[in-house]
Each structure stands twice: as structure tokens, then as C-alpha cells.
Image (spheres, rainbow, N blue to C red):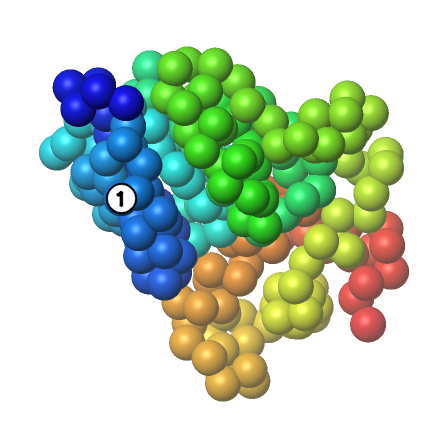
Amino acid sequence: MPSNTRKIRILIVDDHAIVRSGLKLIFEQVADFWVTGEASNSQELLKQLGEGVYDIVLLDMDMPGMSGQKLISHVKTCYPCLPMLILSMHDEPHIAVMAIKAGASGYITKDCDLDVLLPAIRAVAAHKTFIAPGMADRMVFTESPSKQTNLHTLLTPREMQVFKWLVAGASINDIASHLAISNKTVSTHKARMMEKLNLSSMVELTRYAMHYSLGD
């Protein structure tokens, strides 16, 4: 590839330093890729976007602070022409649908091969849509998640613990004390849990718990 080929300026957003470092090492070997920024949370992402110029954001779905659908929507609102490629640990089609509807241009999973990752970045940076192989077919048959999947099955064990404590009426402080974790960590688990369940209030959470008999 000619040395004067325009490089794709990439902003890597992931809360795991080892993931960011690994991706940077890979991209350094790709002639048309150039990692010009990185962020570990939503605050750093928004700061980077305000200070730099990027062709694509490679974005993890789950991070401290604002994450997932809300973060994608926020970035899309502020930077409508900036393509976002989601690199996620979740291979559930309804989560991919959620990300695309929120404004992402592509969705792939973290266990994908390089022959998927690299073309995905090139496609999305060129303002095309890219969905992980096999995921697109599954997305076609995904209707409303509530009709096909009990969303609480997507919760991690810790998120389910937080779920049950909240339904029982415990405060963030109470949960943090009981689980021996920080208030901030509890809040992060709560935010991710609410997002996975597509809920926005404690009233909705309580109704969900009652519907599926999850309060015990």
C-alpha cells in the first residue's frame, strides 16, 4: 500500500487497558490504520471527541459511567457524522439491534477474528454498515426482546445481586456495604442492569421483578 495512503484515524474506547494496548499493537501493523486517541470511560471519550479529529470510534458497550445505548445516542447526537463501531462481549442479537438503533454503524464481538475486525473498521469508517457474520441473520428474526428473551438472563451474577437488593428496598449504600464494594461500583452495576432490562425507573424495576417472580 502506498505510503501516502490516507490513514483511518481511530479512537479506541474500552475500560480495560490491556484491551486498548492489544488493539493498538495490532493496528500499528496495519498500513492504513492510525490510533490517534483512546479513552477508558464516557467522560474521557467526550473529552477526546472535543479535542481531536477521528474517522471512527471503536466503542465497548460496557464501561463505567454512561455506557451502552445512552452513550451511543449521546455521541450520535453531538457528532452525527462520526461513525461508531461497537466491539462488544455480548453476542445477543437484540443488543446489536439496540446499538444500531441508537446510532452505531456496526457491531462485532470481541471474540471475532482479525479478518472480521479489520474489514469492519474500514467499512464503518467509510460510512457503511457492518454487522458481525452470523449476527445479521439472527437480528432479522429478533423482534421485541421482551417477546423472545427474558432479559434478566443476560445479567451477570453481580448485576442480579444488585437487582434483588434494589427490589428489596436497599439503598446504594446498603448494597455497597453488604457486597463489600464501592458505591460507585454498585451504581455502575445498577446502570448496566437497568439498560439490559430496558428499564428507566425503580417502579419499572419492581414491576419487572413481580412479573418474573424475581423478588425472593
Residue 82 screen position, x and y as percent: 33, 21
143 up-or-down from 38: above or below: above
Residue at 41%, 24% in the rendered image: 122
State left or right for residue 11 relative to residue 188: left
Residue 111: image location, x then y, percent: 59, 50
Identify the image quadrant of the C terminus.
bottom right
Give the farthest residue toward the front.
1
Asked if residue 195 lies left or right of residue 157, the reply is: left
Please provide percent x and percent y for residue 154: 71, 54
Tell me the crowding category of disc 1: few under 14, some 14 to 19, or many 20 or more residues within 10 angstroms, Cα based. Answer: few
Q: Nearer the viewer, residue 173 or 32?
A: 32
| Residue 152 horizontal side relative to residue 96, left or right | right
Residue at the location (15% across, 32% down)? 52
Identify the residue shown where x is 78% and y is 30%.
Answer: 138
Percent across and percent down for residue 144 are 78, 29
Vertical comparison of 62 with 174: above or below: above
Q: Is residue 14 visible?
A: yes
In the image, taking residue 212 as reference, residue 161 lies left or right, namely left
Question: In this figure, what is the number of numbered marks?
Answer: 1
Using the image, determine if residue 13 lies above or below residue 117: below
Q: Quadrant of residue 83?
A: top left
Image quadrant where residue 141 sits: top right
Q: Quadrant of the N terminus?
A: top left
Q: Residue furthest left?
A: 51
Asked if one can make out residue 78 in the rendered structure from this viewpoint, the answer is no
Q: Residue at x 60, y 54 (%)?
A: 193
According to the picture, the residue beneath numbered tag 1 turns out to be: 28
Q: Secondary structure at mark 1?
A: loop
Q: Amino acid at mark 1?
A: Glu
Identify which residue, 4 or 151, lies in the foreground: 4
